[in-house]
Amino acid sequence: MRGGGWARAVRVVGVVVLLCVAWLQLALPPLPHDPQSTFGGSARETPELDPALSFQRSPTSKFLKSKTQPSSSSTAPKLTPEQILEIQEQIQLRSGNETVLNEELFGPVQPDTIVIAVQVHNRLEYLRHLIVSLAQARDIDSVLLIFSHDYFDEDINQLITTIDFCKVMQIFYPHSLQTHPNSFPGESPGDCPRDTKPEEAAESKCVGT
């Protein structure tokens, strides 16, 4: 009896150990490339979804797609007098039209319409990410989104015209540095250099004493 009791105890312990091992296999997640996570001779792979790939499939990802190579510098190129004149004409035309985009989708502007104004310079990539962020805001379809420009750029204008989640309007500052490089607010001939002291300005007779 004593020998039979030991044999029965060993069998019980063996069964308990096997049950513990089986429970651990079911309870713990498989390690990457774990040979134990195979079934029927083939590896069971559970790849994680890349958040970047998930975002690229979203409707707002189109605002991040660039048709032109982004510039690494924010310095504006020097324009010819003809280019400046053309930009001034475009600014006058667009500002005079006061066009509100997407009114056919979201209705006309009402007295109680919320207005969000965004000041834009020439950083196209920053603007792309801002638009993506605004597109995901709650009730954005009920606002009027106004972009105020002190720099005229066709790539920026094209990007804004693709916005389809709210009413959009563009306004342009008519007296910008871009269109007035040699007069106010740019530097006119005879202007005092920056940080000129009053007595120095009076002595040199520069403009801006």
Image: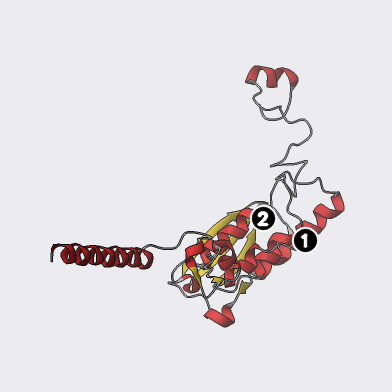
Tell me: residue 158, above or below residue 102: above
Q: Nearer the viewer, residue 70 or 203?
A: 70
Q: Is residue 185 above or below residue 94?
A: above
Q: Earlier in the sequence, mark 1 or mark 2?
A: 1
User: Which corner quadrant of the image does residue 26 belong to?
Assistant: bottom left
Label 1 to label 2: alpha-carbon separation: 22 Å
Q: Specify the label residue 124 is tagged with.
A: 2
**From the viewer's perspective, is residue 29 above or below residue 166?**
above
Callout 2: helix, strand or loop? helix
Q: At label 2, which amino acid type do we have?
A: Leu
* Disc number for residue 60: none
Q: Can you say which quadrant of the picture contains the N terminus?
A: bottom left
Between 167 and 176, the residue placed more toward the observer is 167
Q: Quadrant of residue 2?
A: bottom left
Residue at the spot x=64%, y=25% of the render? 195
Residue in view at x 64 percent, y 20 percent: 197
Instruction: Name the residue type under label 1.
Output: Glu
Residue drawn at point x = 72 percent, y = 40 percent:
186
**181 on left or right of 122:** right
In the image, which disc is placed on residue 89? 1
Q: Residue furthest left?
A: 1
Q: Residues within 10 Å of mark 2 (few under 14, many from 20)?
A: many
Q: From this viewpoint, is residue 91 visible?
A: no
Q: Secondary structure at mark 1?
A: helix
Give the crowd class for mark 1: few <14, some 14-19, many >=20 residues within 10 Å. few
The percent coordinates of residue 152 (x first, y second) are: 72, 56
User: Based on the displayed image, in which of its 4 quarters is residue 14 positioned?
Assistant: bottom left
> Horizontally, is 131 left or right of 26 in the view?
right
Say which of 130 and 27 sits in front. Answer: 27
What colouring method underlies this structural image?
secondary structure
Front position among marks 1 and 2: 2
